[in-house]
Image (cartoon, rainbow, N blue to C red):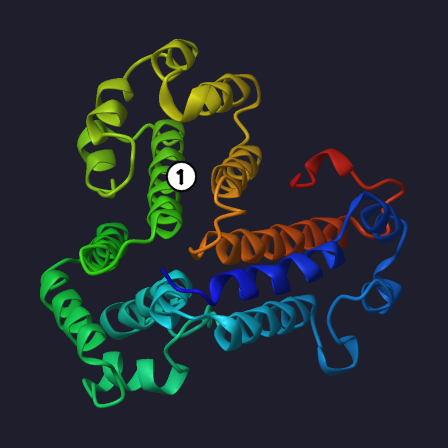
Amino acid sequence: MNNHYPYVNAILRSIDSKIFDKSKWQKLAKTDKNSFFKTLTELGYGKSESAGTLEELIDQELLGVKALIDELTPQKNYTDLFFFQSDAINIRYFFKQKYFGITHFDVYVPLGTIPKETLKKAILEGDYNGLDKPVRKLMQAIEKNVQGITNPRIFSTVIDQTIFDYIFDQFHLFTAPSLKTYFQIYIDSANLLTFLRSRELKWDQETFKEMLLTHGKIELNKFLNSYSLPLEKLPKLWETEYNGQISRIFKVFNENHNLDMTHNALDKLMLEEIKRFKYDAFDIGPVIYYYLLKVAEAKNIRMIYAQAGNEQVDMSQLLEY
């Protein structure tokens, strides 16, 4: 056990009261787009004078949180693995650029652990000198696994699976229950969204199966055995998963067929599950939970900004925490 975690957790508890609450959301919801940045600054969020867009402002805020976590963490290999989720997005982007020539947009996420130019050189030029040995081996594994794949959808899945294989291999080297739980829920959520999206698009089961990811808590056979069943039968079959929360998600989706609302419900599920680790004295759990609160805060800011100037903002879309 590391005796620095109580100190880190105390610091995070002292600042989590600054995360937006109901009164701040209500004030922000009354703001038009012209004064939105100014209001955010008044409420203690970001530095609007150095941000040209809302996404830049949010990135600045989250980068500040990441920098604080990097400074405080007693086990940087844990936090680096957590933030590797952003590296995964960037790795996928540069591999697609390399193999499919996708250059007309940039989805680079600045919240990862690998500098942009280092990652770009590694993937596009094969220059691995700036990478740690384990990450270098990961890049080589991805290169090997994507050979001959021409379907962009399967290409992305193979990259994601290779990255998750790498992440879960790390859990053989150290124990971090909250971190492992986070990635398991992340994978289950991705599989569930793929399950619903594939059904809506009427893809056959084999096409769907190619996009499933392993390492989640939910067995893949559960998805496959349910794939051809009517939607109204799924809540009963899934009521044992995550204490009935997946069952409730299916019930709501059966009523509205709204994947955005499903995504929101899965984000809420993640928060609720990781909240169980909020008070762990000697683990990364409180760090993960605090960062997820900041991510939820950012999602709510985006939602309100999208509706800014409307006669009324639909506050029911807010992600609760």
Q: Where is residue 196 drawn, in percent x and y?
A: 39, 30
Is 34 situated left or right of 299 in this image? right
Residue at horizontal 44 percent and vertical 65 percent from the top: 3
Viewport quadrant of the N terminus: bottom left
Compared to residue 149, the image places residue 253 above or below, namely above
- Does residue 151 appear in this view? no
Q: Where is residue 242 drawn, in percent x and y?
A: 41, 26
Residue at horizontal 52 percent and vertical 25 percent from the top: 257
Based on the displayed image, in which of its 4 quarters is residue 268 positioned?
top right
Compared to residue 313, the image places residue 32 above or below, namely below
Is 131 situated left or right of 237 in this image? left
Q: Which of 23 and 175 lies nearest the eye of the viewer?
A: 175
Based on the displayed image, in which of its 4 quarters is residue 121 positioned?
bottom left
- Does residue 60 appear in this view? yes
The kind of secondary structure element at disc 1 is: helix
Residue at horizontal 51 percent and vertical 39 percent from the top: 263
Looking at the rendered structure, the kind of residue marked 1 is Ser
Q: Where is residue 133 drawn, in percent x and y?
A: 18, 79
Q: Which residue is mark 1?
A: 189
Residue at horizontal 63 percent and vertical 52 percent from the top: 299
Compared to residue 158, the image places residue 46 above or below, namely below
Q: Which of 30 and 176 lies nearest the eye of the viewer?
A: 176
